[in-house]
Image (cartoon, rainbow, N blue to C red):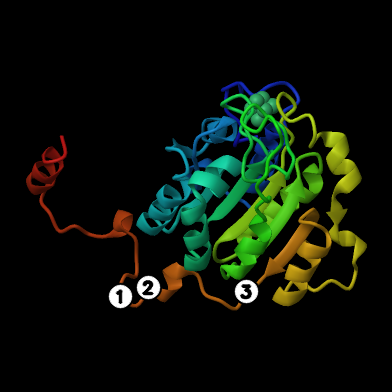
Amino acid sequence: KEFRNNVKPNWCPGCGDFSIQAAIQRAAANVGLEPENLAVISGIGCSGRISGYINAYGLHGIHGRALPIAQGVKLANRELTVIASGGDGDGFAIGMGHTVHAIRRNIDITYIVMDNQIYGLTKGQTSPRSAEGFKTKSTPEGSIESVLSPLEIALSAGATFVAQSFSSDLKQLTALIEAGLNHKGFSLINVFSPCVTFNKVNTYDWFKENIVNLSQFPDYDPTNRIAAMNKIMETNGLLTGLIYQNTARKPYEDLIAGFQPEGLARQDLKLTSDEFDKLLSEFK
Ligand code: SF4
């Protein structure tokens, strides 16, 4: 309850993003966070509004730049739990360079992508997650580009936590966000989140018929990176569950602790009050 605020989301009725908002709020409460311990940083797009809908620190950044901001927040104040969030266009098109390098850097943040396979805010153009042949105003004859597989890219970039879920499966999604928040390092959680207004192909029914839940494979080992890659490819990227986790690799913050033991927010600047005011005045 404490992560709810009074701001009414202006998403379309039925948008998958509502469930993701609820899952983040539940997961944050379930892992024992307080609002003052959490920062939610978002990019641009319908999903980018999420930072204003959670009762926590929030910053609605610029297009494709949620991750650079989120990494800066975490390094400046390592006591904060940091969630970055945005859509597939935000994270896998304009922001893809940041996504890959944030994955390999392994700073302890949780990145939740609301993947609706289309650009919703700009009224329905083809995104990197749209399938070949997908028709929109930007590809009236059907997309001729191959679809991008964020899970395969994450694994090959050295990800330590890769999960995927569906906004309708609130129980699984909440559990995966909790696992991501508890993971020490960068966690990627890609969430199928239907855009009911512009994407008439990848609907709730389509996902229910096509996604493959990892619970069907009781012998699956999420610590085996090669098995994870194979399973993603076998299921055409429609796998849901905890796909891969590596707890052996230390997060970035631990690796720099020897020469930078704490973030800027906790460093003693050794300035008098007058000197501090003078420093701040330079930024006015
Ligand atoms: Fe959701 Fe699509 Fe509406 Fe945006 S346009 S709020 S993604 S349903």
What is the spatial separation of the Cα atoms under label 2 and label 3, in whole angstroms? 18 Å
Q: Is mark 2 within 8 Å of ligand 1?
A: no
Q: Horizontal and vertical percent for residue 213?
A: 86, 55
Q: Amino acid at mark 2?
A: Ile
**Relative to 188, residue 19 above or below:** above
Badge 1 vs badge 2, beta-carbon distance below 8 Å: yes
Q: Circle 1 is placed at which residue position?
A: 259
Q: Quick one: label 1, few (<14), some, or many (20+) residues within 10 Å? A: few
Horizontal relation, residue 235 to residue 115: left or right: right
Q: Name the residue rendered at 46%, 53% in the picture.
A: 80
Look at the numbered disc 3 and give the secondary structure of its residue. Answer: loop
Residue 247 is labelled as 3
Examine the rendering and report whether any part of residue 238 can be seen: yes
Look at the numbered disc 2 and give the secondary structure of its residue. Answer: loop
Residue 256 is labelled as 2
Q: Amino acid at mark 1?
A: Phe
